[in-house]
Image (cartoon, rainbow, N blue to C red):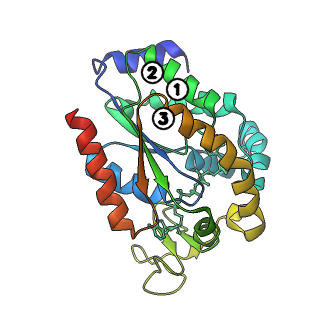
Amino acid sequence: MTSESVAGATARDGGTRRIIVMMGAPGAGKGTQAERLADELGLPHVSTGELFREMLGSDSKLGRKVRGYVESGGLVPDDIVVAMVKGRLDEPDAAGGVILDGFPRTVAQAEALDRMLRKVGAAVTAVLYIEVPQEMLLARLTGRRICTLDDQHVYHVVAMPPRKEGICDVDGAELYQRKDDSEKTVQGRLDQQLPPMFEVVDYYAGHDVLFPVRGDQPPDGVTADLLRVVAVRDAA
Ligand code: AP5
């Protein structure tokens, strides 16, 4: 994927792309909320974590390279992540914009995204930062369960349980726990990923596009706050 092809894709939309970045610690609720916003705003939900998990499912050289990072709770190297996102932004369905979930996660990634967008006359529209007290994150992650048929169907054993234990409400498939949601790995994820995330938060605060929202409230309340922010941003 070349930078020219990304440029070509954006040139078609006259620079009106909506680039919404969902930020927050592991378990803050980015995926849950990104899915709702994608439905509301008619934009594709691009989760780098999901793209990596798909990659792990295929026996490719890149998948083998990425596996160690994802399964140990570390960050995948910036060059791999940036190339993958660049490719995804060039897909036709991203021409009007995207909701980025889990990217950028380092200042180097944030700078690469800015460069990528600047080249095509676009910019980050809003960074929606879901803030959750750190002591809540461990319980959110270790209690998460996901549908084996569709990983957009996400539950929590206490906060958002399925009607029948272990079974997806939507399609009746079994639920599973992500490998990196074990208690041991979760602590490693938080230790490794929170410091660079706070640097990215500072980076966007310095660019006047950061909008913090309280994530320690029921999911519908978080969604309402996020949609309010987007509406204000759209009207500006
Ligand atoms: P990724 O899949 O992005 O993992 P993450 O950032 O750790 O985020 P999570 O998916 O764990 O949490 P979330 O914030 O989406 O929370 P969710 O909505 O599910 O990345 C996986 C791995 O890929 C990374 O560890 C890394 O190795 C690699 N990677 C990805 N992007 C990368 C990048 N840019 N650079 C380098 N490496 C990268 O909610 C969590 C739970 O809480 C669920 O059970 C949910 O039901 C529940 N919940 C949600 N909202 C609420 C609420 N308001 N109240 C109560 N419970 C709630």
Left or right of residue 88: residue 13: left
Which amino acid, by three-letter code, is at mark 2?
A: Leu
State which tag comes first along the sequence, 3 or 1. 1
Q: Nearer the viewer, mark 3 or mark 2?
A: 3
Residue 113 disc label? 1
Residue corresponding to mark 2: 117
Q: Are marks 1 and 2 in contact (CB under 8 Å)?
A: yes
Q: Is mark 2 within 8 Å of ligand 1?
A: no
Tell me which corner region of the image, top left, top right, bottom left or bottom right, holds residue 177: bottom right
Give how far across and how far down residue 221 sits, in percent.
33, 65
Q: CA distance from mark 3 to mark 2?
A: 18 Å
Q: Quadrant of the C terminus?
A: top left
Q: Are marks 3 and 2 in contact (CB under 8 Å)?
A: no
- Disc 1 is placed on an element classified as helix
Residue 72 disc label? none
Give how far across and how far down residue 73 sits, in percent.
73, 53
Q: CA distance from mark 1 to mark 2?
A: 6 Å
Q: Quadrant of the N terminus?
A: top right
Left or right of residue 187: residue 213: left
Circle 1 Cα neighbour tier, 10 Å, few/some/many (<14 / 14–19 / ≥20):
some
| Residue depicted at 71% across the width and 40% down the height | 76
Q: Quadrant of ligand 1?
A: bottom right
- Disc 3 is placed on an element classified as helix
Counting every numbered tag in the picture gives 3
| Residue depicted at 48% across the width and 77% down the height | 159
Residue corresponding to mark 3: 205
